[in-house]
Image (cartoon, rainbow, N blue to C red):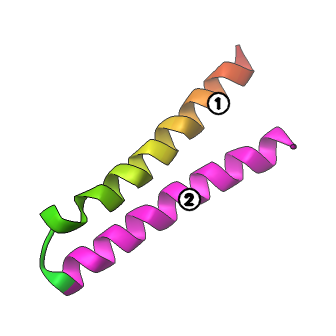
Amino acid sequence: MNRRLLYVILLSLAFVAMVIGVHRSLVQDDFAGNYWIFMIGFLFYILYGYTKKKDSA
């Protein structure tokens, strides 16, 4: 798989998870119940940074 495509996919998944988490938190008025969605987005962002750093070294 093309590395650049992997970067775009990971960053996009991180962004989408954060947007979904914010939307559900505003609609349901419950941040703690949707905390897991934010953590999935954060995990994708960490994976993005890790793969980008690993490939540049």
Q: Residue at 24% across / 66% down in the picture?
A: 34
Q: Could you tell me which secondary element the residue under label 1 belongs to?
A: helix
* Amino acid at circle 1: Thr
> Marks 1 and 2, Cα distance to the nearest angstrom?
15 Å
- Relative side of 45 to 57, left or right: left
Q: Position of residue 8 (x, y in %)?
A: 69, 52
Q: Mark 2 points at which residue?
A: 13
Residue 21 part of the magenta segment: yes
Q: Give the camera-side residue of 36 and 7.
A: 36
* Amino acid at circle 2: Leu
Number of marks drawn: 2
User: Residue most toward the top?
Assistant: 57
Q: Give the camera-side residue of 44 and 33.
A: 33
Q: Position of residue 22 (x, y in %)?
A: 30, 71
Q: Do the residues labelled 1 and 2 touch (CB within 8 Å)?
A: no
Quarter that holds the C terminus: top right
Quarter that holds the N terminus: top right
- Which numbered tag is attached to residue 3? none
Q: Could you tell me which secondary element the residue under label 2 belongs to?
A: helix
Q: Residue at 34% across / 61% down in the picture?
A: 37
Q: Main secondary structure of the magenta part?
A: helix
Q: Position of residue 40 (x, y in %)?
A: 41, 52
- Relative side of 18 to 57, left or right: left
| In this view, 44 is above or below 29 | above
Q: What stretch is highlighted in magenta?
A: 1-27
| In this view, 57 is above or below 4 | above
Q: Name the residue under label 1.
A: 51
